[in-house]
Image (cartoon, coloured by chain):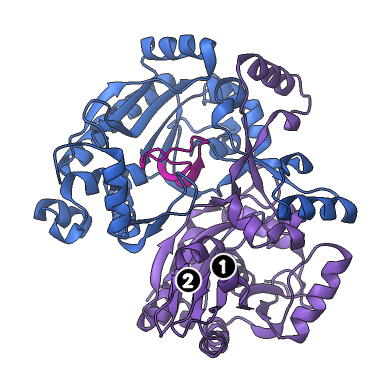
Chain colours: A blue, B purple
Amino acid sequence: MPEIYDAQTFYEGLVKHGLIVPVGVPGAFGRGAVFEDVLERFNAMVSRLSAADGAEHFTFPPVISRRILERVHYMDSFPHLCGAIYSFFGKEAQARELAARINGGEPWGELLGITDVVLNPAACYPVYPSFTGTVPSAGRLVTMMNWVYRHEPSPEPTRMQSFRVREFVRVGTADQVVQWRDMWLQRGLDLLSGLGLDARADVASDPFFGRSGKMLATTQKEQRLKFEVLIPVISADNPTAVCSFNFHQEHFGSTFDIHTSDGAIANTACLGFGLERIVMALFRTHGFEPGRWPQEVRSQLWP
Amino acid sequence: MPEIYDAQTFYEGLVKHGLIVPVGVPGAFGRGAVFEDVLERFNAMVSRLSAADGAEHFTFPPVISRRILERVHYMDSFPHLCGAIYSFFGKEAQARELAARINGGEPWGELLGITDVVLNPAACYPVYPSFTGTVPSAGRLVTMMNWVYRHEPSPEPTRMQSFRVREFVRVGTADQVVQWRDMWLQRGLDLLSGLGLDARADVASDPFFGRSGKMLATTQKEQRLKFEVLIPVISADNPTAVCSFNFHQEHFGSTFDIHTSDGAIANTACLGFGLERIVMALFRTHGFEPGRWPQEVRSQLWP
């Protein structure tokens, strides 16, 4: 692998080696068998590493209730990233009009209406409503692997519209969840470094929309609410965020009426491994052929 | 399990046993750890059964190019089932208007615009554009497990908006693909019957929209282009389709310029296992606790 980082060259290498399959729109490519194998094996490493924690395991579909986005005020901060789902609610005549427009190459977006579901923009969102009520004194710990959507089409391979996140969510007192997040930050760094990846942690902020968003991002950084683990994949100067660790304080607890056993509003934190990005970091670091990766890396993924 | 079939009672049983988690919208529930374990183990059985066939393996995200839906004329036939993805393309002032509408409880669907991606309505769709060109004389065979979306919200648990399909696609001459489909129809029946499920095959049709759709469905049945495997899950009289076997003739070959080695337009066929529905059929047939399933069923899923 050359020492020069370049998004286009890396993308072409992934395609040439059958690791990803172009589909005509950016950020929604297919994944080949070898790519999937590495992804599943890394995910299994995370499961083994955290097995003793006793997290409850869930899988949620790529779509969630639109009401969740509305209640957590997602559209106040990230309207440009959302993916809301629209469908056709008309009768025969409108259906003929719709087909005629599409087959004539004309715009047809205004003929559909909004549904009650949206694409899930953050792996942890669907689980919070299920916590409503009082959690046990030890809190709650859940893990999920969900497909996540962000509307940011880009030819840059790590900037995907649709990708999987292996997520953990902790509910409890502020002390419980911050201690847990800090433990995982070190654990995540050790896991990735142990796979020969040049991983480092940094304070981070979310990509809030607009001018007021810049202030929100500054406050978020000052309060050290978000950390990321970064690895160079397509740039040495701007390494790619492959994990994110977020302390939400009482945001979800107050929105979804989640309480700790002493009656206070629960705090929550979450962390997510961006699985496709980690797989790409492995290919970028060790080469496009897993059979030729260093033995100490292979022995962990293929135990 | 009582002999009376009832959708509501079955749904409540799935929830009570932690197999699924309600999320506030119909057909998009979360899946618990036991549900997922059975799903993955059934999927692994399909992989073992077909290992010698040598299919290429892909995974596609839940979203595909909108251009695919347009080219295959999906919206002519199934506009009511589509899920098109809309996002926000405005600037600061429009974002403030959007947030104000949402936080005021007003409709906001008209403030978003259509994107270049749609939810994938059929597990096989994203792979056809990658076949463009001439296939080898033995044809092509691929397999995928993709999330599929249908806009048909329903409290009936087997009628989901979002679910997974284990799919196989065959490309070649008409003889090649029909022979392959017929082989799999018997193989699928044997697989499901071997798990103690009351499975039978029948000629079927797609849920085409409107009056002209009724004629299309009749023609499709007369030509025997679609078969399904059916198992009673929520009704004895109207068993649930858990697999579908489709002969597309030259539909995708002509749309995506796929040719056989003799220069003719390629024929295609596909088949899909509706994974959640098969898992539900197992729970309905053998009870909500896999630990108490018959040994001959357990020994196949937990080999």
Residue B289 appears in the figure = no
Give the mark nearest the N terminus, 2 or 1: 2
Residue B108 picture location, percent across and down: 74, 28
Marks 2 and 1, how far apart at CA: 8 Å
| Residue where numbered disc 2 is placed | B42
Screen quadrant of the C terminus of chain A: bottom left
Q: Quadrant of residue A200?
A: top left
In magenta stretch: residue B176: no
Q: Secondary structure at mark 2?
A: helix
Residue depicted at 56% across the width and 63% down the height: B125
Residue B73 appears in the figure = yes
Instruction: Choose between A71 and B222: the one closer to the eye.
Output: B222
Q: Quadrant of residue A21?
A: bottom left
Hey, what amino acid is under mark 1? Val
- Span colored in magenta: A144-166
Q: Describe residue B289's horizontal placement relative to residue A233 as left or right.
A: right
| Residue where numbered disc 1 is placed | B279
Residue A241 picture location, percent across and down: 32, 32
